[in-house]
């Protein structure tokens, strides 16, 4: 019995030492076999020895062996749990795995393009103005020389909030708001959202962006309008285009013109071009000399001052520049599209 006790003591010491050196599951298994293997393990050896003891001693000795066995089992289990946890942890920081891709945010392509347009006008001495997207009938129509029930209003149909309030159909009302507050010289651009009663298709959307321009000063002529737009459009389209003016009508300008640029897609060489329809020209903006009545509406003397104005779609211009066939792509938020164009 004494013999057995000291043997257990000896094994326990050895075990404590051995267990502190186990670093992996293989070493753990080895140690387990050494102590717990059913046939040759140390514990099995102790059990054999137990059989040789006199009956009175068996109970105490058996208890000693079992306590020792439990201790070993518990220690080995603890170690096994630790290894398992480490395995999980190692998985979480496996540096050989490809990382999760993380994208930088970027401005929307339309915003990038708008800033490009603004830069050209800022270089010419224009400043940027802003106005409300919910407008009154007066600013959106009447002050711009659209009398009530005038048929020209049909082309600018929109969503009404009540009889007097509506979502603005163009950025032109901001011309009036600015001229009410500032006296000439005025040289401004007005970028912003506008709204129309439109069903979305490749070239229409119920909401889109416009950029308006207004210059009012002494002695402003149509030549100034032509020179400014010529400079802007050539800067915008890298000098690669031709420009033409066509007579047109807008209630707030007289005379009025629509401005075309030569087709950037086919250069006038394809009869079935989807962008210009084979004409070689695409309309890019509306413009004209500010109607004297509009100046009167804001108490600027049309005998003394004159001005020109223009308005263009930012989306539309971006479509020509980047050769994007469908305006709806700007608003669908497909990240493949946004990423493609947000840095151009
Ligand atoms: N507001 C017009 C539109 O939305 C565009 C426009 C035409 C603006 C002629 C102007 C202008 O300032 O002079 O269709």
Image: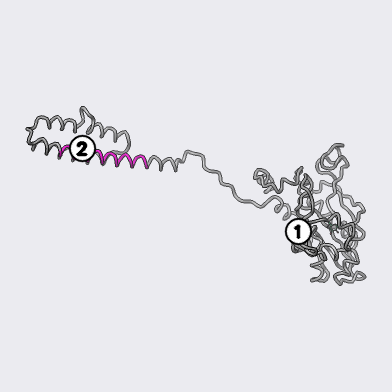
Marks 1 & 2, CB-CB < 8 Å contact: no
The residue that label 1 is drawn on is 191
Q: Secondary structure at mark 2?
A: helix
Q: Secondary structure at mark 1?
A: strand
Q: Which sits earlier in the primary sequence, circle 1 or circle 2?
A: 2
Give the residue at x 44% y 42%: 92
Verify whether residue 131 appears in magenta: no
Is 297 situated left or right of 315 in this image?
right
| Quarter holding ligand 1 | bottom right
Label 1 crowd bin: few (<14), some (14–19), many (20+), radius 10 Å: many
- Is residue 117 positioned above or below 281 on the image? below
Name the one closer to the observer, 223 or 84: 84
Name the one closer to the observer, 46 or 198: 198
Q: Main secondary structure of the magenta part?
A: helix
On the question of residue 201 being in view, the answer is: yes
Give the residue at x 72% y 51%: 110
Which mark is on residue 322? none
Q: Quadrant of the N terminus?
A: top left
Is 196 situated left or right of 98 in this image?
right
The residue that label 2 is drawn on is 69
On the question of residue 126 being in view, the answer is: no
What is the total number of numbered labels drawn onto the structure image? 2
Read off the magenta span: 63-85
Tell me residue 327's x, y (percent): 75, 46
Tell me residue 231's x, y (percent): 83, 55
Image-quadrant location for residue 70: top left
Residue projecting furthest to the top: 39
Q: Nearer the viewer, mark 1 or mark 2?
A: 2
Tell me residue 4's x, y (percent): 11, 36
Name the one closer to the observer, 247 or 151: 151
Q: CA distance from mark 1 to mark 2?
A: 83 Å
């Amino acid at each position: 019995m004494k013999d057995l006790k000291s043997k257990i003591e000896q094994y326990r010491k050895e075990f404590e030492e051995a267990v502190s050196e186990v670093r992996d599951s293989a070493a753990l298994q080895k140690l387990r076999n050494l102590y717990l293997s059913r046939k040759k393990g140390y514990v099995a050896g102790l059990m054999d020895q137990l059989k040789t003891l006199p009956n009175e001693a068996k109970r105490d000795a058996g208890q000693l062996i079992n306590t020792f066995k439990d201790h070993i089992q518990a220690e080995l289990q603890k170690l096994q749990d630790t290894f398992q946890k480490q395995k999980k942890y190692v998985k979480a920081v496996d540096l050989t795995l490809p990382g999760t891709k993380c994208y930088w945010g970027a401005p929307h392509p339309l915003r990038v393009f708008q800033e490009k347009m603004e830069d050209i006008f800022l270089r010419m001495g224009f400043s940027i103005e802003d106005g409300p997207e919910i407008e009154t009938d007066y600013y959106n129509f009447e002050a711009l020389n659209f009398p009530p029930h005038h048929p020209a209003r049909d082309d600018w149909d929109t969503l009404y909030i009540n009889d007097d309030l509506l979502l603005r159909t163009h950025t032109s009302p901001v011309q009036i708001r600015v001229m009410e507050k500032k006296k000439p010289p005025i040289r401004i651009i007005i970028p912003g959202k506008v709204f129309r009663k439109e069903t979305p298709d490749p070239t229409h959307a119920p909401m889109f962006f416009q950029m308006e321009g207004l210059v009012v000063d002494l002695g402003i002529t149509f030549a100034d309008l032509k020179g400014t737009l010529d400079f802007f459009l050539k800067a915008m389209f890298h000098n690669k285009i031709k420009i033409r003016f066509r007579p047109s009508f807008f209630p707030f300008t007289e005379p009025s013109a629509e401005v075309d640029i030569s087709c950037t897609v086919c250069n006038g060489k394809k009869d079935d071009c989807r962008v210009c329809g084979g004409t070689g020209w695409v309309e890019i903006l509306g413009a004209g000399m500010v109607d004297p009545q509009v100046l009167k509406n804001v108490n600027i003397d049309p005998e003394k001052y004159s001005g020109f104005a223009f308005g263009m779609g930012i989306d539309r211009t971006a479509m020509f520049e980047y050769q994007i066939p469908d305006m709806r792509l700007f608003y669908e938020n497909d990240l493949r599209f946004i990423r493609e164009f947000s840095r151009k």
